[in-house]
Image (cartoon, grey):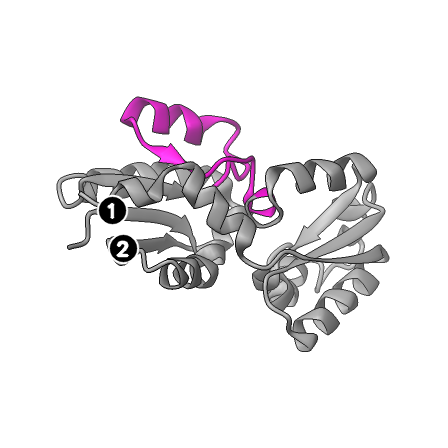
Amino acid sequence: MKTTLIIACGALAHEIVAVLKANSWSHVDVTCLPAEWHNTPEKIAPAIEQKIHEHKNDYQSILIGYGDCGSGGKLDHLLEAEGVERLPGAHCYSFFSGLDQFAELAEDEIGTFYLTDYLAANFDRLILRDLGIEKHPELADMYFGNYKKLVYLSQQQDSSLLDKARAAAEKLGLNFEHVHTGLAPLTQSFRDIKIEAHTG
């Protein structure tokens, strides 16, 4: 019986499903909102509120696979009002790296741009095209002029994604660093919100 629903960012869909399968958390369903909404974060909290209201009578519990994600605290305010818990951390980078490792990376260089597998695979579309850099290259400096380094947080050992992440750093004129996270930190994030307990 499916007792728990995760409402998540589409950028996390592949990894969340992999974690659920690896841990035999068969009591969990997943529904995702468009990953592209990170470029329009004002859409995220209202859409999650709608999803919660649509499904709150269908499941014993609902969990949220989002960080603040640029909502300016609106998402956490909503979730507190609804009594719904989300993954710990400000954004997906900390989900994938773990809170402690992400804090170390951020302390090492505050001017860091991060990629995950999803963002590496879709960099040209989500960053270059959707942010207008493809047509107006001068925008790159507006968006990334204060960054010094690109850190690729990889979940898979995939040489083609690694190549794409290196190319992304080159396109932005940033130094490149690769940190392989695997899925263990994301799995622990779900354990931290006691996903196993939501079995009915």
Extent of the magenta region: 66-94
- In the image, residue 45 lies at what x, y percent? 39, 36
Rendered view: 108 above or below 174: above
On the rendered structure, is 113 left or right of 56? right
Q: Return the mark for residue 152.
A: none
Q: Is residue 89 magenta?
A: yes
Q: Which quadrant would the N terminus be assigned to in this image?
A: bottom left
> SS for tag 1?
strand
**Which residue is identified by label 1?**
4
Q: Return the mark for residue 29.
A: 2
Q: Type of residue at label 1? A: Thr
Q: Type of residue at label 2? A: Asp
In depth, the one of 52 and 98 nearer the eye is 98
> SS for tag 2?
strand
Kindly tell me whether residue 46 is visible in this rendering.
yes
On the rendered structure, is 126 left or right of 110? left
Q: Residue at x 36, y 63 (%)?
A: 21
Kindly tell me whether residue 47 is visible in this rendering.
no
Q: Residue at x 78, y 47 (%)?
A: 144
Q: Residue at x 28, y 27 (%)?
A: 82
Q: Residue at x 49, y 45 (%)?
A: 188
Residue count near mark 2 (Cα–Cα under 10 Å), binned few <14, some 14–19, many ≥20: some
Quote the CA–CA distance across marks 2 and 1: 6 Å
Question: Extreme bottom residue here?
Answer: 160
